[in-house]
């Protein structure tokens, strides 16, 4: 496998942020996502879900194009106070196979604009 990859990014609190992951095998070919589901978790720190505050963002698998679309929607983003968070995007086949595709940090900043 050619993952997990690392992607650190900045995010304005309450905005919509979307990115696409195209997982590859070590030979560069597309990783077949047929039969996989995806999860996108954001947390205050690394560790068990019982010891940190964890948020679930949206992750959708496109089995035809072998990609995962990850989205932080405003409802989830509003819960993220300014600061630094960690995240993982994982896929699983339901057969005890879990792969972490992407991991990294999110730097959350308040928006400059006021409420609409």
Image (tube, rainbow, N blue to C red):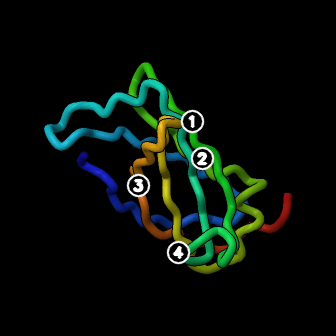
Q: Residue furthest front?
A: 96
Residue at (66% x, 76% y) in the render: 52
Work out whether residue 6 or residue 93 is closer to the camera in this orientation and state it: 93
3D distance between C-alphas at marks 1 and 3: 14 Å
Left or right position of 109 against 100: right
Q: Residues within 10 Å of mark 2 (few under 14, many from 20)?
A: some
Is tag 3's residue or tag 4's residue first in the polypeptide sequence?
A: 4
- Residue at horizontal 48%, vertical 70%? 105
Question: CB under 8 Å between callouts 1 and 2?
Answer: yes
The quarter of the displayed image where residue 38 is located: top right
Question: Which residue is the site of mark 2?
Answer: 71
Q: Which mark is residue 60?
A: 1
**Gap in angstroms between the C-alphas marked 3 and 4:** 14 Å
Q: Nearer the viewer, mark 3 or mark 2?
A: 3
- Asked which quadrant contains residue 64, the reply is top left
Q: Is residue 59 left or right of residue 101?
A: right
Residue at x 24% of width, y 48% of height: 2
Q: Who comes first in sequence, dot 3 or dot 2?
A: 2
User: Which residue is more in the foreground, 57 or 50?
Assistant: 50
């Amino acid at each position: 496998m050619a993952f997990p990859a690392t992607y650190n990014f900045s995010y304005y609190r309450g905005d919509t942020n979307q990115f696409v992951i195209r997982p590859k095998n070590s030979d560069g070919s597309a990783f077949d996502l047929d039969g996989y589901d995806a999860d996108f978790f954001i947390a205050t720190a690394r560790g068990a879900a019982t010891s940190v505050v964890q948020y679930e963002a949206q992750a959708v698998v496109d089995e035809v194009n072998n990609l995962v679309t990850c989205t932080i929607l405003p409802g989830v983003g509003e819960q993220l106070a300014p600061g630094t968070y960690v995240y993982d995007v994982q896929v699983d086949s339901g057969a005890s196979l879990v792969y972490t595709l992407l991991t990294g940090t999110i730097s959350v900043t308040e928006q400059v604009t006021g409420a609409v």
